[in-house]
Amino acid sequence: MKHRLIARIMCDLTDELLWKPRIEWARKHNRTADLKFRVGDGKRTCVTHRKNSDEDCRMTLTIGALMVESKANPMEMCMWRTSVELHERGYYGGELNLLNALAHCIIHEFGHVVQVVLGRRYESSVHNHEFYAILDRIHASPVAGQLRDELSRRCLDIGVDLQANSVNKTTVSAILDGKAAEGILTMGSIRVGQRLFFRDPKLSDVGQVVVKEKRRTRVLVEQVARPNQRWLAKPHGLVDKESRP
């Protein structure tokens, strides 16, 4: 899949459909408001700005090429905050496929742009009720559908059908609601001290690993045998003893 090219399309659509039509609005709130776009090499997808944004509201929106690659994997797609939002808040009908995930990612990041312009982005409270009110308003407007349709069209033009990459609803519910199903381990089903194996056959020589710590979307595991190496792993990349191939 053409991850970098898709990320560039996402940048272009944010500029054309969300930012440019609202530049005058933004500069009424902050005359220094400006937004640049870049495609990053990693997963990081975010809006960065200066701390004194009231006086210098220059922002950069980065779309990570590896974020696109990650979301193209149905299991990893479920782990992103934006996917949880789609599932829980019913954006785009709550249907989780790559098209909806990437279209909502654009809206999510632009929500942060709105926060900065309004001077309402706080380090201690970013994804708050006010932020989701911004997302709700965007999704309730015609631009949400226009954005998704245009993203689909431009990706089809480069030979990528984003709608073809979707996640089974049972799997979505199992992962996002924290319930194990069909052999899938989730954050909710894993406990510290539990002994597991890597699902990937390439890591079969590692043997058993023990869960040392649970983080937001990954678990820290340590090899039981020497040399006791450690890894940060996604829950769905691990299996228990009974389900080991």
Image (cartoon, rainbow, N blue to C red):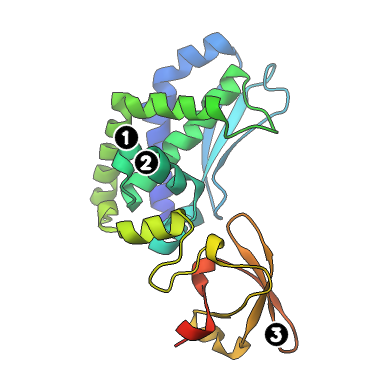
Residue 232 vs residue 133: left or right? right
Disc 3 marks which residue?
A: 224
Determine whether label 2 and label 1 are within 8 Å by CB. yes
Mark found first going from the N terminus, 3 or 1: 1
In the rendered image of this protein, does residue 64 appear above or below residue 13? below
Determine whether label 3 and label 2 are within 8 Å by CB. no
Mark found first going from the N terminus, 2 or 1: 2
| Residue 98 location (% of width, % of height) | 34, 52
Of 73 and 61, nearer the camera is: 73
| Residue 110 location (% of width, % of height) | 48, 31
Disc 2 marks which residue?
A: 103
Residue 172 vs residue 222: left or right? left
Q: Secondary structure at mark 2?
A: helix
Q: Secondary structure at mark 1?
A: helix
Q: Is residue 20 visible?
A: yes
| Residue 95 location (% of width, % of height) | 30, 47
Task: Indicate the amino acid at tag 2.
Answer: Ala
Task: Find the distance from the CA under tag 3 to the CA under tag 2.
Answer: 42 Å
Task: Indicate the amino acid at tag 1.
Answer: Leu
Give the quadrant of residue 206.
Answer: bottom right
In the picture, which quadrant includes the C terminus? Answer: bottom left
- Front position among marks 3 and 1: 3
Q: Secondary structure at mark 3?
A: loop
Task: Indicate the amino acid at tag 3.
Answer: Val
In the rendered image of this protein, does residue 125 appear above or below residue 94? above
